[in-house]
Image: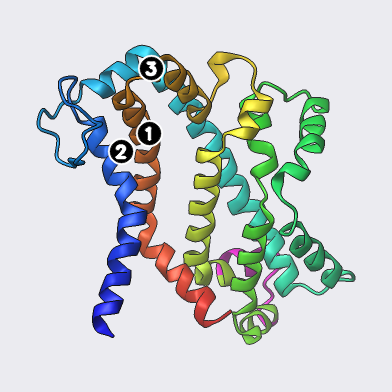
Amino acid sequence: MKTLRYFLLAFVLIITVGPFVWQLSTSLKGAGEDIYTQTPSFIPHQPTLNNYAKVADAIPVWRYIGNSLVVAALTVGGNIVFATMAGYAIARLKFRGRSVVLGLFLSTLVLPGEVTIVSQYVTVRDFGLADTLLGVALPGMVAALNVLLMYNAFRALPQEIDEAAIVDGATVPQRLLRVSLPAVRGTLAVVAIFAFIQAWDDFLWPLIVLTSPEQYTLTVGLQYLSGTFTQDQRLIAAGTMIAFIPIAILFSALQRYFFKGVEEGGVKG
């Protein structure tokens, strides 16, 4: 039985980590190495960073990274602020129609994003935000899933905490910021990571909204790289690694809070 577990663990590791290791290896291989050998080699025999330099020469990668960071910052900030307030209101405040609001948030999870993409574009265009980074970030600044994550985290807190704060004369913003929010920092980190990944990896929506090349995000800009160097998979792999690095940095910085947030949702929810 233990052998089967180790086999399944190794199989899952190969199919999840294997493609990443292969892309990293390909991005570090020199021009003289054959990447299409019958026996795959994960260790470059002529390791080089020239592929990354060529990516920067082929496309304005730093501008695209800056645009993606702006979109990601707006998306993360919007979700942290608005998803937190919405989740707290549904979980801790009593108002008429609260169950209806919660049901509406739940119902949006059933709909695929492509169903609402036309109405989102019309709304962004009518606001005059087409071909802007704010227009790219706006629809993702309040994600229903993040609202529900915060709702679940706030709901798990004992009601007596709010009652004691009310007796002490605390207002709703004070109860949110000083009492409840410090107790759900783990879930807040989960929301930040999910929002960042969603904004950073999104391709279809920026492709629809943006028309000026100087406004392109990294995922859209890398398509120029794929089209220009279709035969050179080394450069495409290097571009993929460039897109992956910020996600790895963010997760490494917040992993402690991320697992704490997962534990909060699993144990208390």
Give the residue number, with chain letter if any, for mark 2. 23
Gap in angstroms between the C-alphas marked 2 and 1: 8 Å
Amino acid type of the residue tagged 2 in the rendering:
Gln
Could you tell me if the residues under marks 2 and 3 are in contact, i.e. CB atoms within 8 Å? no
Q: CA distance from mark 2 to mark 3?
A: 16 Å
Picture residue at 27% right of the left edge, 42% below the top: 22
Above or below — where is 60 with respect to 67?
above
Relative depth, front residue between 242 and 130: 242
* Residue 108 figure quarter: bottom right
Secondary element type, mark 3: loop
- The residue drawn where x is 66% and y is 60% is 147
Q: Amino acid at mark 3?
A: Phe
Q: Is residue 174 magenta?
A: yes
> Is 23 above or below relative to 256?
above
Instruction: Measuring from the top left, give residue 93's x and y in whole percent.
Output: 76, 72
Highlighted range, magenta: 167-178
Does residue 265 appear to the left or right of 6 in the view shown? Answer: right
Tell me how far mark 1 sits from mark 3, CA to CA: 13 Å
Counting residues from the start of the chain, the first of labels 2 and 3 encountered is: 2
Main SS of the magenta segment?
A: helix
Split into 4 quadrants, where in the image is the N terminus? bottom left
In primary-sequence order, the first of circles 1 and 3 is 3
Mark 1 crowdedness (10 Å alpha carbons): few <14, some 14-19, many ≥20? some
Which amino acid does the dot numbered 1 rest on? Thr
Say which quadrant the C terminus sits in: bottom right
Check whether the beta carbons of the residues at disc 2 and disc 1 lie within 8 A of each other: yes
Q: Are marks 1 and 3 in contact (CB under 8 Å)?
A: no
Q: State the count of labels.
A: 3
Q: Which residue is mark 3?
A: 229
Q: Which residue is mark 1?
A: 240
Specify whether residue 74 is painted magenta. Answer: no
Does the image show residue 73?
no
